[in-house]
Amino acid sequence: MFALAERQRQRRFRNEIPANSAPESRKVAHFLHIDVRLPKNASAIKGKDREKHTSTVSPARAMVRQRQRPGRVGMTDSKRRKSQLVADKRYPTKGKPAAAGAKRKPAPKRKAPAPKRPRRGGPLGWLSRFFGWIFGLIWGFAWRIGMIVALLVGLAVALVYSTLPDVTALLDGRARGSVTLLDREGDVFAWRGDQFGGVITTDTVSPHLKNAVVATEDKRFYYHVGLSPRGIASAVRINLREGRGPLSGHGGSTITQQTAKLLCLGVPFDPEEWKSEAAYEADCRRGSLWRKVKEAVYSLAMEAKYSKDEILNIYLNRAFLGAGARGFEAASQRYFGKSSAQVDPAEAAMLAGLLVAPTRYAPTNSLKRSQERARVVVALMEEQGYLTAAQADGARANPARLSEAAAAQAGGYFADWVMSELPDYFGGNTTEDVIIRTTLDQRIQTSAEEAMRFVFQEKVRDGSKAQAAIVVMSADGAVRAMVGGRDTKVTGAFNRATQAARQTGSSFKPFVYATALELGHSPLDTVVDEPYCINIAGSGQWCPKNYTNKHYGRVTLAQALKDSLNVPAVKVAEAMGLDNVRRVASDFGIDSDLAAGPALALGASESSLIEMTGAYAGILNGGSSVEPYGLTELHLQGENEVLMATGTGIGERVINKDAAAQLIWMMEKVISEGSGRRAALPGRPAAGKTGTTQAARDAWFIGFTADYVTGVWMGYDDNTPLKGVTGGGLPAEIWHETMIRVHEGTPVNPLPMQAPRQPKPIAQPKPQQPKGGLGQAVDQLLRDLFGN
């Protein structure tokens, strides 16, 4: 077929060559290697000349050359302009003028334009043209604005990029340091401040933890440039569907954007500008439109400056995860007692689940809620291929649990008290990481908390708002346990053991009798319990009464204390001198503003539970004052130099040892025979004193064994009177339950008490003439106090 087409082409070409142009045509044909057959009427060319000017090429070569030429070569009649031959183009004739009357080569013909569509007429046409014009206007405006915005964003990103520091400077961004508290055995029991466990990276943490964070917070983290339009659109849709504003609630932020927010867009905390760190962080979390724009620019700059893993490193180290933990290493240590490199899938899921709401999902607040959130994270990890089905099933079947110390959450009130006793530069405002060894005994702390719960569950009516507090300490003032309220697992709550100043009631009476013993009186000395009134300047007559509204005649000092009689206590205080009583109480550590009048003897003054317990410790240790303490030594993390230390809380002697030993003997009778019998410990000697204030607004029981001093207070925060409660009732029972648990498994030690000698018979004085004036008044007072 190809050969046939070639022959037809050659035939057409031969027929177009005029007879009078044979030489010229033959030259062209020879040059083009085309087989040309001259017409019969070309008589000028004969024989060999005809053969000489005839040449043959293969059909394929001829076709290729024909395709290479832009147009078909042919000859026309005299009325048409001859086309310029290829040979003429290659070898132009020099010096020959153009033939006269030669026509210029016409311009190549243009392709005829397609016929225009007829415009649609009528209203529809006008409307179509109008909207087309509007669209064109908007498009032209939009792309120009887009170019300007892109240029401005690029400049902003470049500016932020130039301010970003090295990534290592961003890993620990805390404005303050942390405080780690150790118990008396050296085990961690509490943390305060911003806890930072140390720098971690994506290479050092558990792969499960890294995968859990990415699966939960930003599954396209490794594929976007810092922003996720899909995520933002989804968040806006969810917010609108839930009735919130488009920027309220779900943010659709990538991990990069969240990291930018954690960095507060590069604005550091300035104590002079911000009232508190909380106010600073709240401003960093604002969700205004302008804030989102700046956050996006900062995120793009971070993506340009740092690698994906470096951005994730910043996030892993700075994220807040509840309970004061900053970063996943601190959170892992806080909740599980292990490094973040050792967490399993269930623990990793629980930690990652905290990111959405750290306080709400903190396992120390609600382990069940935290485990439910972790199940959601496990499902996401399985869905995205980070966990096999078997691993996911294992994580769901064995959810993460708190470490023993974290689960106990023991000593929250104690930790708060220790922190309050520290200088600010080592406590709440420290910029360093501080380690404090304390006096806390976690076994005793747990015993006190269990005793509190037991009594309120078993012996207090449901719905009661009554509160209680417990303090346990050694005789030297070392606090071993502290419970500041019924809710034992708290941090930063009102501590009724240290912060509540309440009237002490009859629990103050031991200091009245301590004054008498110090001044040489015996527990067996007597005083008359009878109706008694005192005229108080500016207040009128005051007549103290016993709790039973009865009087018992002549009683010993020991009996008066044992039965908590009010009239004898007031008489003894008046006889010993109120100033002396006030001095003894103050020297024992009761630093409150003590009452000036005779009501001092009945506990009209206010004091805190820790002060009162410390004062009783002074009685146990033989009569020396005590300063309650909880810190034994303090040093900075990573350093061995001790910056603060406390060896003992014992201070100066207040009363002599014999007086203290006799007072302990008197107080032992309170528990074994008197108003405090419900506090008795089977097989173990104990001493103490009940206390109930006017209208039963406060009820106390404070006592001790040879090993520990324990104080208990009970009452309402709003001073509502207790119903049917005295110091010898529920407070004594709480004390009993606490001491039973505290002494479990410990040897029985005797109290350091001393029984008094029997008093010698007192010779009857000879009758004396009545004295007038002051002397008679003094004699009458002494007879009223100690009889005839």
Image (spheres, grey):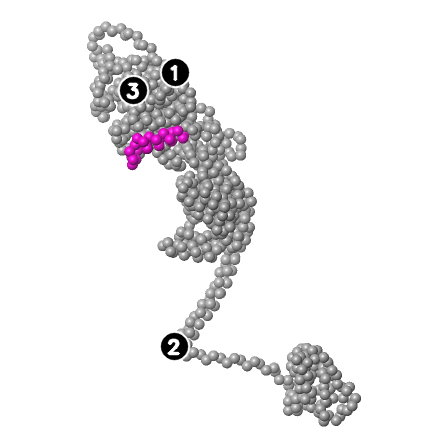
**Residue sitting at 66 percent across and 84 percent down?**
8
Residue 620 locus on image (x, y percent): 38, 20
Q: Nearer the viewer, residue 342 or 624?
A: 342
Q: Which quarter of the rendered picture does the C terminus lie within?
A: top left
Q: Nearer the viewer, mark 1 or mark 2?
A: 2
Q: Nearer the viewer, residue 649 or 456?
A: 456
Q: Magenta segment: does it hold 318?
A: no
> What amino acid type is highlighted by mark number 1?
Lys
Magenta segment's dominant SS is helix
Q: Nearer the viewer, mark 2 or mark 3?
A: 3
Residue at image mark 3? 674
Label 3: which secondary element: loop
Give the answer, above or below, for where 305 lies relative to 652.
below
**Residue sitting at 32 percent across and 19 percent down?**
672
Give the answer, above or below, for where 672 lies relative to 285.
above
Q: Nearer the viewer, residue 422 or 328?
A: 328
Q: For residue 657, which numbered disc appears in the image? A: 1
Q: Return the disc, 1 or 2, that comes first in the chain's sequence.
A: 2
Q: Is residue 711 visible?
A: no
Give the answer, above or below, for where 598 lies relative to 220.
above
Residue at image mark 2? 123
> What amino acid type is highlighted by mark number 3?
Gly
Q: CA distance from mark 2 to mark 3?
A: 109 Å
Q: CA distance from mark 1 to mark 2?
A: 116 Å
Q: Magenta segment: does it hold 457?
A: yes
Q: Return the disc, 3 or 1, that comes first in the chain's sequence.
A: 1
> What amino acid type is highlighted by mark number 2?
Pro
Asked whether, in this view, residue 51 is left or right of residue 691, the answer is right
Point out the stretch of residues depicted in magenta. 445-467
